[in-house]
Image: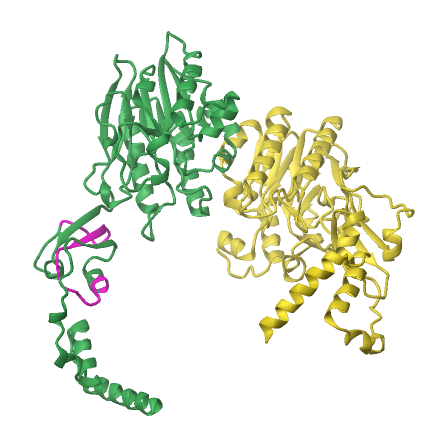
Chain colours: A yellow, B green
Amino acid sequence: MRFLHTADWHIGKKLHGYDLLTEQRDAYEQIKAIALAEQVDAVVIAGDLYDRALPSEDAVSTLDAMLVDLNRQQQFPLLAISGNHDSAVRLSQGSEWFASTDFYLKTTIADGVKPVVLGDTQFFLLPYFEPFAVRQYFQDDSLKTVAAGMARLVTAMQEQFDPTKKHVLVAHFFAAGSQHSDSETLVQVGGLNAVPVDLLTPFDYVALGHLHRKEALQNEPTIKYSGSPLKFSTSEAADTKGVWIVDTDKTPVEVTFKPLKPLHDLVVLTDSFAHLMDPEVKYNVTPDDFIAVALTDTTPIANVMQRLKTRFPKIIELQRVNQLDVTPETLNIEEVQRDPLTLLGDFFGTVTDHALTEQQQEWAKTTLQQAMKEEN
Amino acid sequence: MRFLHTADWHIGKKLHGYDLLTEQRDAYEQIKAIALAEQVDAVVIAGDLYDRALPSEDAVSTLDAMLVDLNRQQQFPLLAISGNHDSAVRLSQGSEWFASTDFYLKTTIADGVKPVVLGDTQFFLLPYFEPFAVRQYFQDDSLKTVAAGMARLVTAMQEQFDPTKKHVLVAHFFAAGSQHSDSETLVQVGGLNAVPVDLLTPFDYVALGHLHRKEALQNEPTIKYSGSPLKFSTSEAADTKGVWIVDTDKTPVEVTFKPLKPLHDLVVLTDSFAHLMDPEVKYNVTPDDFIAVALTDTTPIANVMQRLKTRFPKIIELQRVNQLDVTPETLNIEEVQRDPLTLLGDFFGTVTDHALTEQQQEWAKTTLQQAMKEEN
């Protein structure tokens, strides 16, 4: 059994207001191409197919088209679970029919402990769960944490183990020891909700979703996060995104990383405003790339976002690396006390690099007089 | 071919704030029982499966359970279309897999003109559509109305007619000549959107959804609204709800009405307040029935809704049949000028049918004195 492991597609996610459907469709096409080139026997998606419990119609039709293509056109068996970002109920609409073409989408704990057998492998498709759901399922109030619930679930799964088969767990949780990035929902990772990796040793391979960086678990050769297919935060800017190809015919299973090339990258540019605006300075980015700017300047800059966007249209973040250097001494009392018309002219000049035209001065004067008359 | 024709389930609909899922599940069980007893070859649902484009999770899981039961457990072939209350995109999630068990759910015009063949019959499953969608589909800007679009669609369907088969249209629109009830969305019925029934003569049977009363089309033996399984408005209170059993083996097709018995009925009670509150007067209703009260009284009644609800817990509407009889002469100036404590006692007596206790009088007195002190 040779399968592709991916997760955290988050279809419908926006990056600081920018729609990502184009980028997500491109990543999907690359994943499909890898599945075809690697001649895998199945594709595993370890949760968070959607970004929201209530996805938009565009997100619904986009994901539906991908799943139809992968399973019905390309005829890959599909193994998927719901993540914490999915509504289990909404995602599972129609899933009773999916198994007719070997598409197994599981959204309940009860389904998670029953193995799906494909070839030489038993797959346990365990969706994201909260501790109360395990308490309810086992009728055991002592299961207070995800870790306690998981220990019990692993025991239940082991009772189903066929010793002549390989055993793969597909799940969506925070495995202890892993490092998280900024694009996961922080309240739901780590702490009481962490699952110790030791619990997972009975499985030949564990295909995880939840954390968006494959680097989150580095020292476990057979317990892997695939990470998201796209970079969803600046903390992932330096990462290489991709999928795992898992071969269960080898013992231990053989795991190979296949990178995805971002259609539009997420890049952090750390530099001074003057450099960033200088047409002579070349950065390795395209106008469609998502740019996080880390300014090194220590002085205030008027209209900084608007001006930066003339060079980098898709700025998703603007931060200052250094403290602003503003002291009371820099305030020139004489300048502040000038008459309003002069002040307006100075401000206009600073912001636009142009002086007010005579017509504009006339408009400003009339408006100011009008305003003063109303005030009196 | 013998099939059951139903429509306008509106799963998730609320009746003046009251959840109807219990009543909808009961109606579904009756429909299933009729399908089994009549040994039909298929079940047709002519649109508005949900009440809203964005149904609640409860509505999603309720409808999904019904469709799974009908098609996968009971193994009835299912023919369904989206109505104006459904989101075509959301409803169709997963529909590519449904045909594996003869569940045909169509949500686009392109799908509507391609017949689904079951036994001796070609079914054309045409979802609810807006004129712009037909213009786009035929690339013809002259199609301004639903009627014009429908004429063109019928021609396109006739080109697909197999003369050795019967031809059934399943659709969701306002057929001209039909009378509407209050529970449809008024802006979307009638007027420019009406389809003349003459257009529909090429079909052996037309299974319509959209209007909630089967009585909406009375003189067409083979063009029928099934109506909704439940009463959704007081204008439907006197109706008998049900489904049609259609037998295409006969020429013309044989059409039989099968009634549904409401779990909790919707009843209009027209009577005086005194009668309605009199325990001696018996009405043929249960505490779970939905009651619309039409009061015959001509005098104001204090707390009327609250008091009526003590006898009829689920009042969904309160109307006055007669004009209120309030004239200036009925105001007794002496009564109005009494001291506040006496006025309060009178009001309390009118509303509760009890006098103030000594303790309550004491509280009222203290509070009034306090209020007067603060006023001065």
| Any part of residue B243 in sight | yes
Q: Is residue B172 above or below residue B11?
A: above
x and y percentages locating residue A17 in the rendered image: 66, 49
Residue at far top of view: B164
x and y percentages locating residue A85 in the rendered image: 59, 49
Between A333 and A112, the one nearer to me in the picture:
A333
Pick the quarter of the image with the N terminus of chain A. Answer: top right
Numbered disc total: 0
Residue at far right of view: A280
Q: Is residue B340 left or right of residue A41?
A: left
Q: Is residue B184 left or right of residue A106?
A: left
Pick the quarter of the image with the C terminus of chain A. Answer: bottom right
Task: Magenta stretch: give its range.
Answer: B284-306
The residue lying at 19 percent from left, 53 percent from top is B293
The residue lying at 44 percent from left, 17 percent from top is B115
Does the magenta portion include B207?
no
Between B16 and A186, the one nearer to me in the picture:
B16
Does the magenta portion include B300?
yes
x and y percentages locating residue B319 in the rendered image: 21, 54
Q: Is residue B89 above or below residue A181?
A: above
Q: Is residue B113 left or right of residue B284?
A: right
The residue lying at 75 percent from left, 47 percent from top is A313
Question: Which secondary structure class fits the magenta region best?
Answer: loop
Between B249 and B211, the one nearer to me in the picture:
B211
Q: Is residue A344 above or below residue B89?
A: below
x and y percentages locating residue A175 in the rendered image: 69, 53
| Any part of residue A113 in sight | no
Q: Which of the 4 image quadrants contains residue A241?
A: top right
